Amino acid sequence: ATCYHEKIKVVAFQGGGDDMDAPIKNIMTDPTSQTEDRFICGVNSYNIARPLMQMVHFVWAYLRVAESLGIKAGDPDFTLDVVLPTGAMGNMAGGYMAKQMGVPIGRMCAGVNVNDITHQAFSTGLVQRSTKMHTTMSEAINIQLPYN
């Protein structure tokens, strides 16, 4: 989705999601990028606003599932287990934050594709960029570095 406004500019970028991190970080940390006339903001998982907003999805999902099962919201015997496709863990971070704030979420399972860097990080304890990223149909989770 694109907003149309004189102060909003959309640009194209060649490469994957991980390739955008360095230029975005450079722009966001460059003091000359922000002026009284220009405010630069990104809404991606590197911005705390994104996982905060994703928390709402977990509240909504919990309430809809409870409703469809005829369970009263807040029933201490009911928790919602979730399985999420994940790359950089942004949505999982939002779910974990919602859980910590009291949404009755049980188990959280992160599904990965062949670029299973998130699984590798949890399995080995090493958070490092993968040497190769495979192109898959699940482009949104083709991540080489789980930065959330």
Image: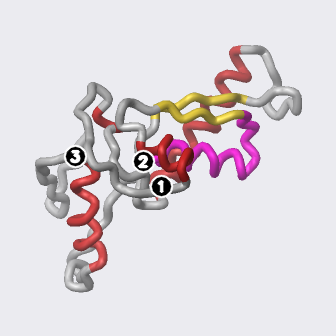
Quarter of the image with the N terminus in it: top left
Is 15 in front, or is 13?
15
- Residue type, mark 3 in image: Gly
Earlier sequence position, callout 3 versus callout 2: 3
Q: In the displayed orientation, state which residue is furthest to the right.
A: 76
**Closer to us: 120 or 118:** 120
Q: Give me the disc on residue 88.
A: 2
The x, y position of residue 114, in whole percent, is 36, 31
Say how the picture is coloured. secondary structure
Q: Is residue 74 above or below residue 71?
A: below
Number of marks: 3
Q: Residue at x 86, y 30 (%)?
A: 75
Residue 36 shown in magenta: no
Secondary structure beneath label 1: loop
Q: Say whether disc 1 or disc 3 marks the residue closer to the N-terminus.
A: 3
Q: SS of the residue at dot 2?
A: loop
The span from disc 1 to disc 3 (Cα, nearest Å) is 17 Å
Q: Identify the residue at horizontal 27%, vertical 69% (top origin).
A: 40
Check residue 148 in the rendering and tell me which mark sits there, or answer none. Answer: 1
Nearer the observer, 147 or 105: 147
x, y percentage for residue 15? 16, 47
Give the SS element for disc 3.
loop
Residue drawn 22% across and 54% down? 19
Q: Residues within 10 Å of mark 2 (few under 14, many from 20)?
A: many
In the displayed structure image, the side of residue 30 where residue 44 appears, left or right: right
Magenta residues, as a range?
88-106
Amino acid type assigned to the residue bearing label 1 in the image:
Asn
Mark 1 and mark 2 in contact (Cβ < 8 Å)?
yes
**Gap in angstroms between the C-alphas marked 2 and 1:** 6 Å
- Give the vertical position of 83 relative to 123 (above or below): above
